[in-house]
Image: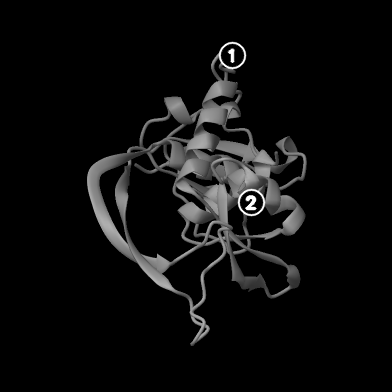
Amino acid sequence: MNLELLRAIANATAANTFVYVSKADGLPLIQHSPPLIMVDTSNVDPEDSTKIGARITAEGAKFLEHTMNHNQVHTKPVSGYSVSTGLELPKVKRGGGGGGGAPSKYPFDTMEVGTHFFVPDSDTKNGNALKTVGSAVGSANQRFMEETGQHETVTRAKRGKDHKTIKDEATGQNVMETVTLPIKKSTKKFTIRAVEAGKQYGSFIAPANGAVVMRTL
């Protein structure tokens, strides 16, 4: 099973967007019992017609959290990244995305509000800390969300057992349904930004090109 893809879909869903997946990549996640993702066949990748938009299901989020926690039960690695204060987050730059990452590698559990850590691009396999660590940040943000006990009613496209949207035979439009979902809140929140070598951000001067992660809640 492609856990990196599932993490990327989870991060995108948390950001109220989606990831385009191919049939080969998405089918194992859909056929899992229960399904870990849902796809919208009407939402086709404008750059690749073989891929369609996917979002994580509630069961998929639980599965991902359980898998992450299980992998950390016996050994909790000591993070090699130091936590500091005094950073002013740079303005967000478009173009960052999801990707691989190892949440247990980073000190999310021990960070206080206002503290941060820095990851140089050279520490990542793809040379892009923003992309690699961004996946871990998205997973951490999901891990520190909890249900409030309240619920909200939303209207969304209805899906069949194959998780495809159901179309009205007369109009061709999506059949809509109203469902009640639990409302969640963040207990901790982390933000990631790219930084450039030698530039100063508050009291922090970036020693190299890379990314900084700050706990903002």
Give the foreground label among 1 and 2: 1
The answer to whether any part of residue 210 appears in the image is: no
Q: Nearer the viewer, residue 127 or 21?
A: 21
The residue to which callout 1 is attached is 75
Specify the farthest residue to the left: 150
Q: Image quadrant for the C terminus?
A: top left
Helix, strand or loop under label 1: loop
Please give the name of the residue rendered at 48% of the width and 31% of the height, measured from the top-left corner.
108
Specify the farthest residue to the front: 169
The residue to which callout 2 is attached is 196
Across and down, in percent, residue 131 comes to: 65, 49
Please give the name of the residue rendered at 32% of the width and 63% of the height, measured from the top-left corner.
154
Q: Name the kind of residue labelled 1 in the image.
A: Thr
Count of labels shown? 2
Please give the name of the residue rendered at 49% of the width and 29% of the height, measured from the top-left corner.
83
Across and down, in percent, residue 123 comes to: 72, 35
Label drawn at residue 135 = none
Earlier sequence position, callout 1 versus callout 2: 1
Q: Quadrant of residue 53?
A: bottom right
- Residue 55, relative to residue 141: is it above or below? below
Across and down, in percent, residue 167 comes to: 52, 76
Helix, strand or loop under label 2: loop
Q: Quadrant of residue 164?
A: bottom right
Q: Name the kind of residue labelled 2 in the image.
A: Glu
- In the image, is 210 to the left or to the right of 65? right
Q: Are marks 1 and 2 in contact (CB under 8 Å)?
A: no
